[in-house]
Image (cartoon, grey):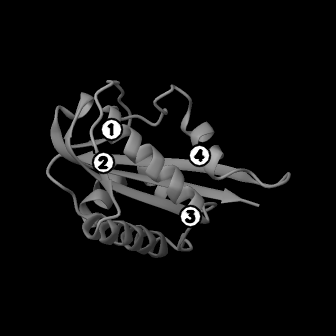
Amino acid sequence: MTALGMGSATTEAAASPTHANGATSALESQVLAELNGIRRAHGLRALRLAPSLGAAADFHSEAMGRYGFFAHESRDGSGFQERVKRFYAPTGNGTWSVGENLLWASNGVGAAAALRAWMASPGHRKNILTARWREIGVSIVAVDRAPGVFGNRDVTIITTEFGVRS
């Protein structure tokens, strides 16, 4: 089962998300490569990794896995823009804009499958093909027996944070 987009529930039960092991790190690289391949095929520039966007993505993936919710809103109910801004702040009076794609799967997911699912969804596709984005953060966590909306299944959660600032 794969879910995309919005949905929320909270629980105080805490699961233990696993991040940055060999499998999830490799999958993060593959997601970036697939995403940039799609952008290039549409005449858009490739996105470069931004550690601050990666930290925002990690924070959200881990919170969703630990507390059993799946939503663009943060656990405290604030919008994703406010969460991302804590990690990827605007600079001066220039341009600042962010976007977010989420995905979870209970039977594992590969990079190509994740990008196919996002490209089949108008909102997610729009984020991938937005020309103004310059940077991205990618986070993938694996959670054993994830609580809440994940139904105590073993899940993989992917968060991508898109951004531009000048």
Identify which residue, 45 or 42, lies in the foreground: 45
Could you tell me residue 36's position as x and y percent? 45, 72
| Residue 17 badge | 2
Whether pointer 4 and pointer 3 mark residues with C-beta atoms closer than 8 Å, the reply is no
Residue bearing the label numbered 3? 51
Q: Amino acid at mark 2?
A: Pro
Q: Residues within 10 Å of mark 2 (few under 14, many from 20)?
A: many
Residue 57 in view, yes or no: yes
Tell me the residue at 48%/75% (across/down): 40
Looking at the rendered structure, the number of numbered marks drawn on it comes to 4
Tell me the residue at 51%/59% (across/down): 54
Whether pointer 1 and pointer 4 mark residues with C-beta atoms closer than 8 Å, the reply is no
Q: Amino acid at mark 3?
A: Pro
Position of the C terminus by quadrant: bottom right
* Disc 1 to disc 3, C-alpha distance: 22 Å
Residue bearing the label numbered 4? 84
Above or below: residue 65 compared with residue 50:
above
* Disc 2 to disc 3, C-alpha distance: 20 Å
Q: Residues within 10 Å of mark 4 (few under 14, many from 20)?
A: many
Whether pointer 2 and pointer 3 mark residues with C-beta atoms closer than 8 Å, the reply is no
Residue bearing the label numbered 1? 66
Sooner in the amino-acid sequence: mark 2 or mark 4: 2
Q: Secondary structure at mark 4?
A: helix
Sooner in the amino-acid sequence: mark 1 or mark 4: 1
Residue 122 in view, yes or no: no
* Disc 2 to disc 4, C-alpha distance: 20 Å
* Disc 1 to disc 4, C-alpha distance: 19 Å
* Disc 1 to disc 2, C-alpha distance: 6 Å
Q: Residues within 10 Å of mark 3 (few under 14, many from 20)?
A: some
Could you tell me residue 134's position as x and y percent? 61, 66
Whether pointer 1 and pointer 2 mark residues with C-beta atoms closer than 8 Å, the reply is yes
Whether pointer 2 and pointer 4 mark residues with C-beta atoms closer than 8 Å, the reply is no
